[in-house]
Amino acid sequence: MAKKPNGDISENEVTDESAYLSRRSLLKGFGAAIVGYHPSSLLSDQMALAKVKIRSELDQMIAQKINSRAKADPMELLDVTPYRYASSYNNFYEFGSGKLDPKKNAKNFVTDPWTVSVQGECDGGGIYHLEDLVRPHLLEERIYRLRCVEAWSMVIPWVGLPLARLLKKFKPRSNAKYVKFETLYDPTQMPGQKSLFSTIEYPYVEALRIDEATNKLSFLAVGMYGKLLPNQNGAPIRLVVPWKYGFKSIKSIVKIEFVEKRPNTTWMKSNPKEYGFYSNVNPSVNHPRWSQATERRLPSSIFSPNIRPTQMFNGYEDDVAHLYRGMDLRKFY
Ligand SMILES: Nc1nc2c(c(=O)[nH]1)N[C@H]1C(S)=C(S)[C@@H](COP(=O)(O)O)O[C@H]1N2
Ligand SMILES: [Mo]
């Protein structure tokens, strides 16, 4: 299959927050009359003002943007997974365990208004509206490989903000050793949470060591392919930790908690022999039931399987290997 750059990617690698916020407002229903117009032409005075204020950050942003682009393997740019795959082949068990279930069942998922509760060992805890978390930051684009533990992979252009920047705002205390994240629990909206035969417990919980969470690659996405995050991809805000198996990248986050002790995370609890806390992508540590040496890069078919070797830390070794220096990665899987 011939590969070509994806037409869905916008040329702007930076989506400024006012454009993002006005898109959120569109969803909120500013009125049917404005639907269909480009959001940036609809900026209210207030939003225009916000735009002026953040313009001074722009130079810095552009430098950052160039850095993050250069970081990605240039060949990966040609390899961005078509939007229709990234937005329809999903894992989001709250909306069903089939790959096509989340798109179908999350269609009416309500993501606005949305609040995130920040708790635990920090001085800046509280309940934050999503917009207030995003507002002070310019959004940036990061093209990352996503490697599922099931041995398929994609390349996705996320839009969002570095996790470290947000965590800093919450003023974690020195005894905060881990950051724990939780997905919304709402069985009325999430049919998977009502299932009697579920393999996992809800709410979905994930966690990172604080130094992992503040690594420059750890990212919170509010969009992808230059658009708002589709519900099935974890709207309105989800974690992206590109050097770890996909299940660490928890979706639709409502709670962030700073804790001293290592939390029990969802997949670990469900099957501790198969899913460890670290879950770093590692071609030489196999899943007990299948090899991790290779992966299927989507789109993939029986005629064109698109099999590639798995890369250590999913190709992000330079940025993250130091986090695990001296650790036996067979033991700390
Ligand atoms: N809350 C929640 N987050 C989740 C999951 C889930 O079932 N529930 N699945 C995980 C898995 S296994 C993967 S591979 C990625 C998939 O993200 P994507 O559908 O955006 O590609 O989301 C992760 N985050
Ligand atoms: Mo996954």
Image (cartoon, rainbow, N blue to C red):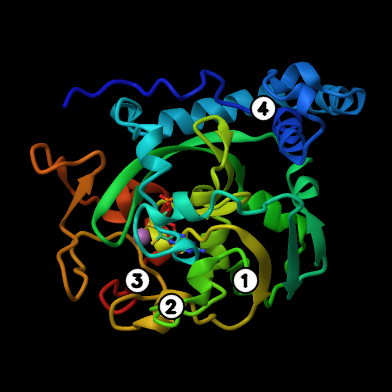
Relative horizontal placement of residue 251, taking residue 306 as reference (left or right):
right
Residue 144: x percent and y percent? Answer: 41, 41
Q: Earlier in the sequence, mark 4 or mark 1?
A: 4
Image quadrant containing the N terminus: top left
Look at label 4 and name its amino acid. Answer: Gln
| Circle 4 crowding by C-alpha within 10 Å: few under 14, some 14–19, many from 20 | few
Q: Secondary structure at mark 3?
A: loop
Q: Secondary structure at mark 2?
A: loop
Q: Is residue 307 visible?
A: yes
Task: Name the residue carrying label 1.
Answer: 185
Residue 206: x percent and y percent? Answer: 52, 70
Relative horizontal placement of residue 185, taking residue 21 as reference (left or right):
left
| Circle 1 crowding by C-alpha within 10 Å: few under 14, some 14–19, many from 20 | some
Image quarter where ligand 2 lies: bottom left
Q: Nearer the viewer, residue 130 or 277?
A: 130
Distance from mark 2 CB to nearest ligand 1 atom below 8 Å: yes
Task: Name the residue carrying label 2.
Answer: 200
Cα gap from disc 4 to disc 2, whole angstroms: 43 Å
Cα gap from disc 2 to disc 1, whole angstroms: 13 Å
To which quarter of the image does residue 174 belong? bottom right
Task: Name the residue carrying label 4.
Answer: 60
User: Relative to 74, is 96 above or below?
Assistant: below
Q: Earlier in the sequence, mark 2 or mark 1?
A: 1
Labelled pair 4, 1 in contact (Cβ < 8 Å)? no
Task: Name the residue carrying label 3.
Answer: 326
| Circle 2 crowding by C-alpha within 10 Å: few under 14, some 14–19, many from 20 | some
Between circles 3 and 2, the one closer to the viewer is 2
Q: Earlier in the sequence, mark 1 or mark 3?
A: 1
To which quarter of the image does residue 255 belong? bottom right
Look at label 1 and name its amino acid. Answer: Tyr
Q: Earlier in the sequence, mark 3 or mark 2?
A: 2
Residue 251: x percent and y percent? Answer: 54, 58
